[in-house]
Amino acid sequence: MVLNFNERSPFTYLMCVICIASLGYGANVMAFEPTSTSPSKLPPWSQVEDTDPDPDPGETTQAVFTLNYPRIQIPFEITLWVLLASFAKIGFHVYHKITVWVPESCLLISIGLIVGGIMHSLHEKPPAVLTSNAFFLYMLPPIVLDSGYFMPTRPFFENFGTVLWFAVVGTLWNSIGIGISLFAICQIEVFGVQDITLQENFLFASIISAVEPVAVLTVFEDISVHEQLYIVVFGECLFNDAVTVVLYNLFNHVAALEVVEAGDVFLDIGHFFVVGLGGTIFGALFGFVTAFTTRFTGKVREIEPLIIFLYSYLAYLIAELLAISSIMAIVICALTMKYYVEENVSQRSCTTIRHVIKMVGSVSETLIFFFLGVVTITTEHEWNWGYILFALLFALLWRGLGILVLTQIINPFRTIPFNFKDQFGLAYGGLRGAVSFALAFTLPDSIGRKDLFITGTIVVIIFTVFIQGITIRPLLKLMNVRKTNRNQETINDEIHKRLMEHTVAGIEDLCGQWSHYYWKDKFMKFNNRILRKILIRDNHPESSIVALYKKLELQNAMEVLDQMSGDISAAPSLISLQYVSSISRPVLLFSEVFETTVSYTNKHTLPDDITAREILMRRHTSLRRSLRAGSFHGTVCNTIYMRALIYTGYRKTKKNAKSYIIIYIIYTLLNMEMRVFDPFLALFLPECCKNVAEVFLSAHGPKFEL
């Protein structure tokens, strides 16, 4: 067979790397003890054959070619695995139609099965790198740091109670329900598992209760499900991992006890809450320390990303040292420091931080799925089909029942309740993945049925990832789940959100009823008065409207410059503070770009007003160039008017939408003329807005009855 490397074929490269990785393990057959400085310790094939029957004792032989594979074995094999994962991801995204219907985790497990089959045919053992310490100290921190750092802040705190409800109570529900059900199955002699104790069943149940969000969230983003469903699944999966690891350690400790007394149960319950709250407080403390440190890195920009990574990892390690929740510590640290750090560091450092966090987290999760496929083939399994099938059945059953019951309890307290379609998405999106496999693989040898638990976990993961992961997209489309467009937020949307939040907070304060709006308003006041002055380097007080306008316009300009898509006017101010769209960059000479763009050192604020005026003037000039002569009266005005109608739902509720149409039209006109306009003024000047709108529509656009 002839391989044509001139063609772009990532799978050809992928198969080459698979062969190299397999040969790397085959080299263990020829492995020898590490060499020393003594010539007698050289390997046999590197020594020159001595034909002299009586060699001179003082004469030495210098080898021409030597191999010292044991010295580089571990880093060499790790590098091959990472390279294999990289080639696999390249191949998946080159042929992107595959990942539209098949989740990436399914493809990674499939590649792992291929590598495992090659290793099994060569009678090689699986790699011994996924130990308990390797997972908890090296692979898990990047995964949870990635999830915590890119958590959408506003919707997360708006649904914070629901997220905790499903993450804590839902995980306890699943673990206890599955554990008791499996213990009942163990009492049936036909299955032959009477030796599995109740504590061990709880331990196994906690392992298969960990939910994997990656595949589900990718589908949710593609089909644009509504924000509440997306953030609840995101947050539940994130905090579910923390609760699962705590339960795993708790049940692992209980399983080691010969006799469990009532006092031990109460102590374990208290320990559960202490571990969770301790990790939360510790993570917030490290987040503030990280933000305070970045105040003084203005002269040494190159170490800013390093500071972020070191403090995050240090929070995780010290939490492990103190036996509190390390996952909660690093997640809360990421959530806390992100708001302040990105205002202190430079734009280049901010980009580096985001890309490195994504890269390391993706590599860690990819390697775990690879090892899952390899171990499935190369490991000796203990099969008990009755116990394994019932474990799979109970995992699906208790997940569905838990969502139905817990949703009925939480819905009366929600402004937007979850309907049946949303509940189906929550229940069916409970895929198991990397955390479940790693916890099963790190079970202690003292567990008698460890191999059975590993086999059962692998079956549950493969079933949920392949069956549920592949079918969730067509099922959600068939059920027509509520959708939203999260990428179409404007400055008008943001200002109206702030207005409603302040209004609701004031009404709650007058009525004496406190919700998250009240506490958010209190925290923002405390943040502006105290925290920002301590944690942010350049904290200049200014109008909140002007600051928001500058922030969104600067972010818009930066995104357009990053995309290199032509005139800035081609991209209107449709900016989301929480969601950043990833767009592939065309090939350009960056030296030419730097000669024509504005230099800035911060992502959210400009160093002076001159630079701000320069960016706005550039955008204003490009906007004027994009408008053809004579097209303003027809195209632009009608477009503005129709956008106002569509945006406010004028066609459905004409009477209630009048004032909002006026505000939107005036704001759009002034925004096009690049003037900083305070839309709040429109709320207090209705007659002025009405008169201006009438003049505008009578002169340039279609008339309507005000």
Image: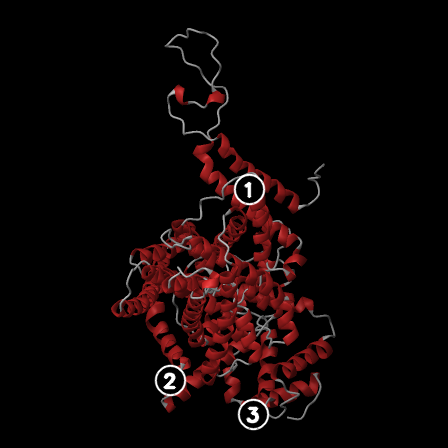
Residue at 40% over, 77% down: 520
Report how far apart the C-alphas of labels 3 and 2 lie in the structure.
35 Å
Q: Nearer the viewer, mark 3 or mark 2?
A: 2
Residue at 61% over, 84% down: 648
Q: Residues within 10 Å of mark 2 (few under 14, many from 20)?
A: some
Residue 688 lies, in percent from the top left, at 56, 89
Q: Residues within 10 Å of mark 3 (few under 14, many from 20)?
A: few
Left or right: residue 24 versus residue 470 is: left
Residue 685 lies, in percent from the top left, at 52, 89
Closest to the observer: 241 or 311?
241
Q: Which mark is residue 119?
A: 1
Mark 2 and mark 1 lie on one chain; the one further toward the N terminus is 1
Check disc 3 and give the amino acid type.
Answer: Glu
Q: Quadrant of the N terminus?
A: top right
Residue at 66% over, 82% down: 641
Check disc 2 and give the amino acid type.
Answer: Trp
Q: Which mark is residue 687?
A: 3
Report how far apart the C-alphas of labels 2 and 1 lie in the structure.
61 Å
